[in-house]
Image (spheres, grey):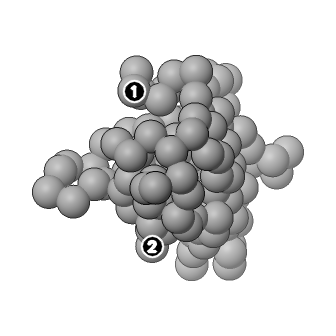
Amino acid sequence: QVQLVESGGGLVEPGGSLRLSCAARGRTFSFYVMAWYRQAPGKQRELVANHSIGGGANYADSVKGRFSISRDKTLSTVYLQMNSLEPEDTAVYYCYARFKKDFWGQGTQVTVSS
């Protein structure tokens, strides 16, 4: 069984930075795709950034130039470096991975507020 364990969320002031991490526990794979999604209160879950083997990184327009996704060399851990955070970035951030089927983390809260 695969578990995705996220960490790094918290409260930060506008303009600040956070780094989210998501590591696979249990059976691990070189996941074909790993990604970060987020869901704000009253809104649908949306893709923030993804990284696929051979496809590189892709970002939502709202975070381009501010967020950066990366993976470790085992391709079972994914990071999201978030800079110049805005109140609109406040959401629960979910890690996603795919290897023959979809896996989701439990979510980590990111709050951007002064």
- Residue type, mark 1 in image: Ser
At a point 68% along the width and 75% down the height, the residue shown is: 25
Mark-to-mark CA distance, 1 and 2? 23 Å
Please say if 17 is above or below 83: below
Residue bearing the label numbered 2: 106
Please say if 82 is above or below 10: above
Determine crowd level at label 2: few under 14, some 14-19, many 20+ residues with C-alpha closer than 10 A. few
- Residue type, mark 2 in image: Gln
Question: Extreme right residue here?
Answer: 73
Count all numbered tags in the image, as a single digit.
2
Q: Nearer the viewer, residue 94 or 24?
A: 94
Q: Position of residue 52 (x, y in %)?
A: 60, 33
Residue bearing the label numbered 1: 62
At a point 30% along the width and 54% down the height, the residue shown is: 39
Determine crowd level at label 1: few under 14, some 14-19, many 20+ residues with C-alpha closer than 10 A. few
Who comes first in sequence, dot 1 or dot 2?
A: 1
Whether residue 28 is visible, yes or no, is yes
At a point 68% along the width and 78% down the height, the residue shown is: 26
Q: Is residue 94 left or right of residue 34?
A: left
CB within 8 Å, label 1 to label 2? no
Judged from the image, the secondary structure of the residue bearing numbered disc 1 is loop
